[in-house]
Amino acid sequence: MATGAPVRIQEVARRAKVSSATVSRVLANKPHVRDELKERVLRVVQDMGYEPNRVARSLRVQRSSVIGLIISDVRNTFFQQLARAVEDIAYQNGYAVFLCNSDEDPEKESLYVNVLRAERVAGVIMSPTRETTKACKALLTAGIPAVAIDRSVLGTTLDSVITDNSEAAYKLVSHLIKQGHKRIGAVFSDLGITTGRERFEGHKRALREAGLPLDETLVKTGLPMDEDGYRLTKSLLESTPRPTALFTGSKLLTYGALHAIYDSSLMIPADIALASFDKLDWMPSLPSMSYAEQPAYDLGKAAMQLLLNRFETPSRAAQKIVLESTIHFDSSYKPTVADPP
Amino acid sequence: MATGAPVRIQEVARRAKVSSATVSRVLANKPHVRDELKERVLRVVQDMGYEPNRVARSLRVQRSSVIGLIISDVRNTFFQQLARAVEDIAYQNGYAVFLCNSDEDPEKESLYVNVLRAERVAGVIMSPTRETTKACKALLTAGIPAVAIDRSVLGTTLDSVITDNSEAAYKLVSHLIKQGHKRIGAVFSDLGITTGRERFEGHKRALREAGLPLDETLVKTGLPMDEDGYRLTKSLLESTPRPTALFTGSKLLTYGALHAIYDSSLMIPADIALASFDKLDWMPSLPSMSYAEQPAYDLGKAAMQLLLNRFETPSRAAQKIVLESTIHFDSSYKPTVADPP
DNA sequence: GTGAAAGCGCTAACAC
DNA sequence: GTGTTAGCGCTTTCAC
């Protein structure tokens, strides 16, 4: 225990008077080992505090027991919950999770993908940035299973777990329209990010069904980060006439938008109504607004399960899992007509 | 490129008509290789898209090029900045960073430590929870260098990078006293966490020097998380007479405290003054308060440099680096006597 | 049911 | 300078 050098399987074998093959079999819970030997081995393993060298094992079996998880922004609590789920399920199945943060930066992302490939991780779960396609294909051709989470990868078919972006956006914007808003500003993620694209689709559908025209000048896109949310909302608030409602397409964009709205001394919902994606984290004064709450934990859980599943059936066709968001309407809302179920 | 199996060093060697040893030397930038060969090898490496198998290398050199970083709460932007710094410096030096989140849970922490040990990581940087000592010693006896960050490990001497907790706390509380406050509530991290302990020391010193008694009922401790900040502050606000000022000992505790204060419909600083550790992230309405801003990025940078340094001189004595925080006094403050420099 | 031995891909000691 | 080769610690045929 106090020794520096870690104990190896051979030493365990010698002490238990068996071969290293037997020790390996016992530890892997393989059948065909006499109970007597099994017990003896386990006792010695316990005594010597033997822990298998995972590096050696990885080299031998040509696959590590590490999962790479690349998320686009660790500051976002949405991704934190998602990561938590991935970790939970991974650990339950003997995998460790290597968390990487791409920061919405395609370069950082491909750097990480390269590292993960070189480390021969067992699989990768990632929320792709705008230009992920190449990096993702590199993984797949290297034989490393990948699962897209929260966002899809354009131009590739692979396992993915996302939410019903278009539908939730449709419901939120329809709600604004029902409240009487006609001039609705919108701030989305870059349309190269599928969440931005799909939420914009829902937005357009809501307008279309209500017979409202799409005013392109009221739609802004950028990176899903506070700074862009602030900047884009600022510019929307300066347009005349000012929009009476705002739809923000992600949590961080919403924070930035709030910042801009408060900066302009506008009140929510008196001066401007707000509907957004993602539930806001606690703040001293949460505004009265509508939002779509995405099942972040379930998203991570499903992705990890999809990956485990892929390990078992490497050749099955790609699956796309779509989870539903829960829509919360602002408290000021009194429905006059029946809402869709 | 389109092939599934990754290319190995032997294949590169064959194509470049050299031995694998030469390829290895070229890639490691070792001296004693003719320029002509070097070029030839690099060209083939490029052509074939060869990337060394880091698992094999790790096994051979008995050390991986992965750094484990265990932080106690990823939701805390303080730790996020710190993690960013560790990553930056690590990458610049050819290391990948394996980010682990202990969530202030000693069990999760020791689970991670075990995984990192089994993965034979090159080193570990960690912000210890309350009961880290054992896990930490296990690392060191396994020959894996460890650096404590933000918090020290009680009962062990090892490399660590922290801030001047006691001093900053002293300044903040002295400031409250100078503003005329006599009844000052305080919320700290569990005193098993060194930041809580040291900040409490500074608090006590400020009171002592001002000739104020320490009212134990005004000092609360808990886990440095929103929930405890809320709960503990609530109980402080219910004591009579109510404290006129509050000192909160960490970012998350401060958020919880704000929540409690707003819940009680109290205004800052009119009803209660606030001094806290850590700069708050943007919020719609930032209260006027004093705070100590810790150099989070520099903390991470210093820790990683300490680790790199340790790789080069494994046997040098343990170092403790203390960085200074910047104190921001609330805007309402008009100094009447000279502040300490 | 158990053991002997090969080999995963790389690096470094040693030869030349 | 460069090549040959042993071996890191494990798993997994293949014998028996």
Image (spheres, coloured by chain):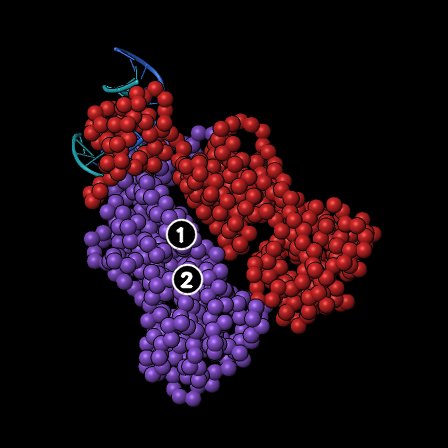
Chain colours: A red, B purple, C cyan, D blue
Q: Rounded to the nearest whole Å, what is the CA distance between mark 2 and mark 1? A: 13 Å
Residue A169 percent location from the top left of the image: 69, 50
Question: Which circle marks residue B222 in the picture?
Answer: 2
Q: Nearer the viewer, residue B141 or B242?
A: B242
Q: Amino acid at mark 1?
A: Asp
Residue B186 in the image: above or below residue B225 = below
Q: Residue at x 53, y 78 (%)?
A: B271
Q: Residue at x 39, y 31 (%)?
A: A62
Residue A37 percent location from the top left of the image: 27, 24
Q: Relative to residue B227, is residue A273 drawn left or right?
A: right
**Quadrant placement of the C terminus of chain B:** bottom left
Q: Residue at x 49, y 43 (%)?
A: A86
Residue A309 percent location from the top left of the image: 52, 32
Q: Relative to residue A254, is residue B305 drawn left or right?
A: left
Q: Relative to residue B216, is residue A330 drawn left or right?
A: right
Mark 2 element type: strand
Q: Chain of mark 2?
A: B
Extreme-right residue of the structure: A211
